[in-house]
Structures are given as C-alpha cells and as structure tokens.
Image (cartoon, helix red, strand yellow):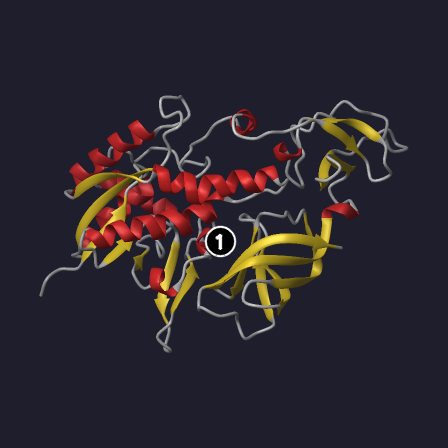
Amino acid sequence: MARKRVVIGMSGGVDSSVSAWLLKEQGYEVIGLFMKNWEDDDDSEYCSTRQDWIDAASVADVVGVDIEAVNFAAEYKDRVFAEFLREYQAGRTPNPDVLCNAEIKFKAFLDHAMKLGADLIATGHYARVRQADNGRFELLKALDASKDQSYFLHRLNQAQLSKTLFPLGEIPKTEVRKIAEKIGLPNAKKKDSTGICFIGERPFREFLNRYLSYKPGPMMTPDGTVVGEHVGLSFYTLGQRKGIGLGGIKSYQSADGSSDAWYVAKKDVAGNVLYVVQGHDHPWLLSAALESAQASWIAGEPPGIEQIAAKTRYRQADVPCSISVSDAERFSLSFATPQWAVTPGQSAVLYDGEVCLGGGIINSAAA
C-alpha cells in the first residue's frame, strides 16, 4: 500500500521543523513547502525571509525531506494585507493571523499542496483535529494550553480540517524543543516569531505609516476635556496603555496624590476623537455584550446550544456566555461578568469545552 503524501508548511521555525520529523517518523511521505508571502521590503532588518528559507532548507536536509519554496505574495497582498489595512483605516484592530490562516495557509497553500499530489497537509500549529461519531471534523484545543492556537484557526471549514494534520497537538512545547535538540536540528534554539503574520517583527506605527492616511485629532476624557492630541486613530487599540503620550499629566490625580494610568477606551471615527480614561477598571473599558459579524462555523452551521464559552482576545481564559444567533453571518454574546477592552476588528472565538465551534469578527460592544 502506497504511503500517504503529506505536504507540510515549513517556516524555518522549530515547531514546523519538529512536525516534519514527527510525520516522517510516523511513516508518511513528507514534502516541505516554504511560503514566501511578503516582498515589499524583504531586504530590511525586520523581514527575515532569506534566513528563514536557509533554516528551513537546512532542517529539510537533516530530516531527510524534499522542500520547495512557493511565492504567495500576490495572494497575501490581495486577500490578507488589503483587508488588514481597510480595518485599520476604519479605526478597528484586525487580527492578521486569523485572516492569514483562512486565506493563505489553509487555502492557497492547500490548493498548491493538492497540485503536488498531497493526500494531507500539515502545519506546526498547536491544535488538534478529531473526527466525531457523526462524521464531522472537530477542531480541538492543543493539550499544551499555554500554546493552544485554536483561536487563530477558528475560520477553518470541514473541507480544510478533513485534509489537515497538526502533529504538535498532543505535545508540550518544552518537549518540542527537546526533540529538536535530540535530533540535531540547526534551529533548535531559534526563538519563536511574534510579529505580524509573514511580515515579521518591526516598529508597528512606523510600518503602518507607509500604508495608511491618517490625521491627528483631540484626545479627550469622557467629560469632554481635551488632554492631548492623538497621531491618527489607526495607531491605537482599545485597552492600550503604553505609547499614548499622557504619562506626565497630573491634572487628574486622586486625593491621595496618586495618578491612575491612562487607557484608550473608545474611538469616534466620524469626529476623529480618541477617548482615554484613567484606571484599568473604568466603566468605559468594560462590556457585558458584543455583536459579531462574518461568522464562521467549523461544523458548517451555528451550534445548537445557548450556553458556551468565548475568548475575545488570544491570551484570555475562556469566559462563560450565552449566544444568540441572528443569521448565518451574525451573532451576539452576553457575559455574566463584563469583559475588559472588547475590541472591534478582533475575533470572538467560541468553545464548548475543548471543542472550538467557530467565531466571528467583533463589530461592537456594549455595557
């Protein structure tokens, strides 16, 4: 019987490298695919594509798999980056990793892999896939809760999940590093990337400056007092504390002389006003409900339950909530405990225990 062919995305990082080795150990015929998705300033200090390709090719050599490079820069610009800029221009805060997974890693990449005769694709994400008794495929959280990436994968559909392997889903990150060292991978100690998907780590405001039109405007408190000037609404996100430029203002000291930190609380896009508040738990930073659009359901339809759990940001613990589904595209969530800095443009991702149900893009939040 012929071995199944798996095409794995190899980024040059340790996670995808160990994934390739594990698949080979499991008896698959493994082909590595290195994706180049950004070309605008690839010679800069922030874009490490060249080094990543060298690392990926070196790993392929050690593991003993073929690897090829493929250029998805045009697809990335059209499907991910253009939407990313549209959202920022509208004063929202998008999550490029969510878009990138849906449009590039599990669409353009999957299509290309199938042309290479793949039976399955694989990535180094920390998540799991399971086929339920009813035949549907489920997306599950990784066993290593601290690394779980199901949040970024919630827009995957049945067709994509049915073709996907996540070799690291049951392995803790510490074990992945140990495997990399044990088998002598050249990138065993390479640090994890934390930048924008495929664009790398760079000064964010300076980067957006090149692509967005923006105009300064007033920075106000809820009572309408102007306390400063913002540099453009696109450059701020709700709940932001650092980089606002109000650290030295003492006019709002409490009676004991202490001065609470300032936070971005609201954007008035039409009036070009940035509202800031003092104190982490200011009422303007708390929301008991949210409205979401662009819903995506892993099962192909909304869940048939009302009581679920949700994350409104990646590093958040699951929060119990009730869901009301308006139509195939929209849903609203109500939280018993108000949530902090619920941000339009970010994803609200829904869970039933360890099963990721899907999610949507946050449109608005309410107290």
**Residue displayed at 65% across by 28% down:** 243
**Residue displayed at 74% across by 33% down:** 261
Q: Is residue 23 left or right of residue 299?
A: left
Say which amino acid is labelled 1. Answer: Tyr
Q: Nearer the viewer, residue 80 or 302?
A: 80
Residue placed farthest to the bottom in the image?
A: 134
- Label count reads 1
Quadrant, the C terminus? bottom right
How far across and how far down the image is residue 167, in percent? 30, 54
How far across and how far down the image is residue 266, in percent? 72, 42
Q: Nearer the viewer, residue 134 or 176?
A: 134
Quadrant in the rendering for residue 338: bottom right
How far across and how far down the image is residue 289, in percent? 69, 59
Quadrant in the rendering for residue 1: bottom left
**Residue displayed at 33% across by 55% down:** 166
**Residue displayed at 58% across by 59% down:** 310
* Mark 1: few/some/many CA within 10 Å (<14, 14-19, 20+): many
Q: Is residue 184 visible?
A: no
Circle 1 sits on which residue? 151
Q: Nearer the viewer, residue 179 or 239?
A: 239
Quadrant in the rendering for residue 230: top right
Find numbered disc 1 in the image and state the secondary structure of the residue it sits on.
helix
Q: Is residue 293 above or below residue 44?
A: below
How far across and how far down the image is residue 121, in percent? 27, 54
Residue placed farthest to the left in the image?
A: 1
Q: Is residue 309 visible?
A: yes
Q: Is residue 27 left or right of residue 100?
A: left
